[in-house]
Amino acid sequence: MAIKAVFFDFDDTLVLTKQADEKAFLQVRELARRALPEVDALALVEDFKTRFTALPWDPSNKVGVDDWRAGLWLQALQDQGQERVEGGQQLSQRLYTCFKSTRLQHIRLEHGVEELVAWLQHKCIGMVVITNGHPEVQRGKLAAVQMERHIPHILVGGEEILQGRPEKPAASIFLRACGLVGCQPHEAWHIGDNLSSDIRGASGAGLAGAVWVNAAGRRVPPDFAWPPSHTVAHVSELQSILEDVLHQDRKVPVCR
């Protein structure tokens, strides 16, 4: 089985976004405690998380993502009984700015990623990053790690949606990735942390491998119909898996 391409999820695969989020929330709690000592800062953050998880941006795209998320902080303040807090709009903006800037400061490529990318380049294996999410948010995080310097081909799910195409787990975004690097689905692998968007999506698109990054050691649900071809705790483990496959196949890609 020839391997011509590897596709990567971004959040919590190439970078630890959830870890960066938690560091950002710590800073927001400190800011909230200083600005409003009477507010339960922990409850404030948890309320924001609930709203953020449910609707991280305006589904109608009428409100900019920064204004939308600042609005979520304002709603969280109001739920804390701060409906008439002086300067509520300004404070909610400060909370959001704190969250956004701290998060970006802690978005870093996972250890071993640059080495893995260099090894894949040496093996002449094409690469594409396929990430879901709001275009502005994802591009900001991608820029924070200079992702295009490492992997120039990047597909952002939110940009696909704006063009009338679906994001992961739709097969179309994986097939577009194949087109970017000139391979067929059976010549590509995908690695990501989300069973639905990454593993189900890659399997449904007919990719040769769907590698699950499972740092928490979770179990695949018994009713999940798309079991991963491999499971790893860290993205860097992909190299040893591919080395075995290439050795067995004896068809090492040749750079042209």
Image (tube, rainbow, N blue to C red):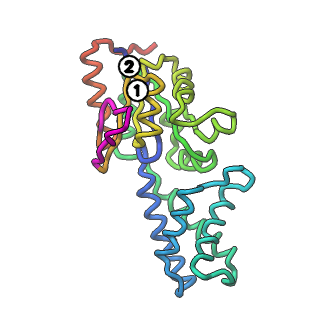
Q: Which residue is mark 2?
A: 3
Taking the magenta stretch, the answer to whether it contains residue 182 is no
Residue occupying the point 63% across, 35% down: 160
Give yes or no for contact between labels 2 and 1 (Cβ–Cβ under 8 Å): yes
Q: Nearest the camera: 81 or 88?
A: 81
Of badges 2 and 1, nearer the viewer stands: 1
Q: Residues within 10 Å of mark 1 (few under 14, many from 20)?
A: many
Residue occupying the point 28% across, 12% down: 250
Residue occupying the point 37% across, 37% down: 224
Q: Look at the numbered disc 2 and give the secondary structure of its residue.
A: loop
Magenta residues span: 217-231
Up-down: is 66 above or below 213?
below
The residue most toward the front is: 223
Image quarter for residue 139?
top right
Q: Look at the numbered disc 1 and give the secondary structure of its residue.
A: strand
Horizontal and vertical percent position of residue 119: 35, 29
Horizontal and vertical percent position of residue 176: 57, 25
Indicate the amino acid at tag 2. Answer: Ile
Q: Nearest the camera: 124 or 210?
A: 210
Q: Which residue is mark 1?
A: 189
Up-down: is 32 above or below 60?
below
Indicate the amino acid at tag 1. Answer: Trp
- The alpha-carbon separation of the residues under discs 2 and 1 comes to 8 Å
Horizontal and vertical percent position of residue 244: 25, 23
Q: Main secondary structure of the magenta part?
A: loop
